[in-house]
């Protein structure tokens, strides 16, 4: 799951695809992912992992790092 | 909100609240105070608030019991929205219909007697829609009726928000006893004083200087008009941020932590960031319950980049008042968000451009550009 998320985020959202990201990299709060991209991320998660994450969970506080994303995905 | 009744009720409730040992009884006291406050504003508002709360609570329980039946959620949201339409938008919609009827001979015209808009109705409706939807999404359970009634009516945030979520509010009122803490009292009163300063000193004084310009604009040069517009940008900020400070501070006195509503919005470097800093509880609501669901309708780029932001922001504008100029203000911001998305795409595909945007001068000019965009948008608001 972690690799798939990193690959998708790197390919789709990052301005510089060479940017190093790991499970603890802050993505939303640092602006690496803008809020519009979160809709695509929600769709990707639904398609890839079969989990629909409600919008109130996709915030800079609760969905900022890959680790947080995986935790939330596992809750649903 | 800044009235003798509000502060008298706040002080009396505060003393009684901390004298009561049980949280459940404290919550009942706050409900009585809140309903009395709403009654003072307008007696019919109490009926609207109570009816809406019973309606939403029943539907909340039905949604919780039958989570797969989406029509229950749809019906509940429609019922709540109907209240908003009847009290706030019926006159506006009738006006649109009558304008169209001018062109079609056989269509009858309607006259609607203007209904008195219960204060705080826009806030309570948005709170109830989030309540019903969060239950459907499995984020929260319906809770106890008393807790939901307190959430609906709490007088500290009733008139001007913030639009708190039940999911955040529920754990705070469900605990056996909120411990008394002088720090909360100190923080609460400090926030209220800051709020009063922002509203009564800064916002009202700016208003004192710029209001004559709006009353007789033809008497002033364009430069004075421009200064007045910049003044208005700060007046509306201090006015609203002041109200939010008072609401958050007053809630803190009772031990409730209500979400923040403003975070230096005019220092945002782009319009998307601005909406994460301005009226945060409303923009979060728009994002969660309009923006995301609208984005699910179609994957087409035109829909995602243009239609979704414009529709969501136009409705956000309409929420501020039943008039076209609020819709235009929303569309202005929606178009701004489209342009920002296109700019982001361009930046992603151009390494040099991306590098240039990381320089300090770019950051400062972005703040200035964004402030100018937002300030020009306020022209729609003034009308």
Image (cartoon, coloured by chain):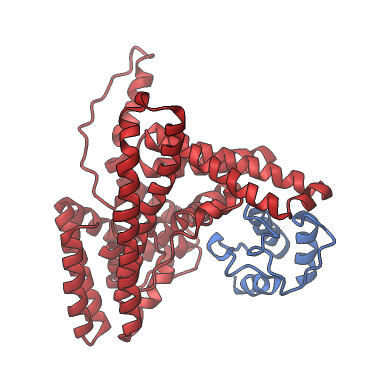
Q: Which is nearer the eye, B326 or B134?
A: B326
Rendering coords of residue B324 (x, y %): 40, 32
Residue at 73% x, 62% y is A48
Give the number of callouts: 0
Estimate the x, y position of residue B76 in percent, counting from the top left.
Answer: 38, 54
Residue at 34%, 50% in the rendered image = B203
Q: Which residue is at the front of the view, B71 or B382?
A: B382
* Identity of the residue furthest to the right in this view: A18
Q: Is residue B323 visible?
A: yes
Q: Image quarter for residue B146?
A: bottom left
B261 up-or-down from B90: above or below: below
User: Is residue B151 shown left or right of residue B3?
Assistant: right
On the picture, is A58 further left or further right than B207?
A: right
Q: In which quarter of the image is residue B108?
A: top left
Question: Residue B215: x and y, percent?
Answer: 30, 31
Q: The blue chain is which one?
A: A
Residue B197 x %, y % = 32, 60
Can you say whether B237 is above or below B208 in the image?
below
Assign the N terminus of chain B to one quadrant of the image: bottom left
The quarter of the rendered structure image containing the C terminus of chain B is top left
Query: For the point 62% across and 41% down, which residue is it?
Result: B338
In the rendered image of this protein, does residue B271 appear above or below residue A28? above
Q: Nearer the viewer, residue B323 or B221?
A: B221
Colour of chain B in the rendered structure image: red
The residue sitting at 22% across, 72% down in the picture is B30
**In this orientation, does residue B144 appear?**
no
């Amino acid at each position: 799951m972690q690799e798939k998320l990193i690959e998708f985020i790197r390919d789709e959202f990052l301005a510089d695809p060479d940017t190093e990201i790991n499970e603890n990299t802050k993505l939303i709060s640092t602006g690496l992912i803008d809020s519009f991209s979160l809709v695509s991320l929600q769709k990707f998660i639904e398609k890839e992992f079969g989990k629909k994450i409600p919008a109130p969970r996709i915030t800079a506080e609760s969905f900022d790092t890959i680790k947080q994303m995986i935790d939330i995905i596992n809750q649903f | 909100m800044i009235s003798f009744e509000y502060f008298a009720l706040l002080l009396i409730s505060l003393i009684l609240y901390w004298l009561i040992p049980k949280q459940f009884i404290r919550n009942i006291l706050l409900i009585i105070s809140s309903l009395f406050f709403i009654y003072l504003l307008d007696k019919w508002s109490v009926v609207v608030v109570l009816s809406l709360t019973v309606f939403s609570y029943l539907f909340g329980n039905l949604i919780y019991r039958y989570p797969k039946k989406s029509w229950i959620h749809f019906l509940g949201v429609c019922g709540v929205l109907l209240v908003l339409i009847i009290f706030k938008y019926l006159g506006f919609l009738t006006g649109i219909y009558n304008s169209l009827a001018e062109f079609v001979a056989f269509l009858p015209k309607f006259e609607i007697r203007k209904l008195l808009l219960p204060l705080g109705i826009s806030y309570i409706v948005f709170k109830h829609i989030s309540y019903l939807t969060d239950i459907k999404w499995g984020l929260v359970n319906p809770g106890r009726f008393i807790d939901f009634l307190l959430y609906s009516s709490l007088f500290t945030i009733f008139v001007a928000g913030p639009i708190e979520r039940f999911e955040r509010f529920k754990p705070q009122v469900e605990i056996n006893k909120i411990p008394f803490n002088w720090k909360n009292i100190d923080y609460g009163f400090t926030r209220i004083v800051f709020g009063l300063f922002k509203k009564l000193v800064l916002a009202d004084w700016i208003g004192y200087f710029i209001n004559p310009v709006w009353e007789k604009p033809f008497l002033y040069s364009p430069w004075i008009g421009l200064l007045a517009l910049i003044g208005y940008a700060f007046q509306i900020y201090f006015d609203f941020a002041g109200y939010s400070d008072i609401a958050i501070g007053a809630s803190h006195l009772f031990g409730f932590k209500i979400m923040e509503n403003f975070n230096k919005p005019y220092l945002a470097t782009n319009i998307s960031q601005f909406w994460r800093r301005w009226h945060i509880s409303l923009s979060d609501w728009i994002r969660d319950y309009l923006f995301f669901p609208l984005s699910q309708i179609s994957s087409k780029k035109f829909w995602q980049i243009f239609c979704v932001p414009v529709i969501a922001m136009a409705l956000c504008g309409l929420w501020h008042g039943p008039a076209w100029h609020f819709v235009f203000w929303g569309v202005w911001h929606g178009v701004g968000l489209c342009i920002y998305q296109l700019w982001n795409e361009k930046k992603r595909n151009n390494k040099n451009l991306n590098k240039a945007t990381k320089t300090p001068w770019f950051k400062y000019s972005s703040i200035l550009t964004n402030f100018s965009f937002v300030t020009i948008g306020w022209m729609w608001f003034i009308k």
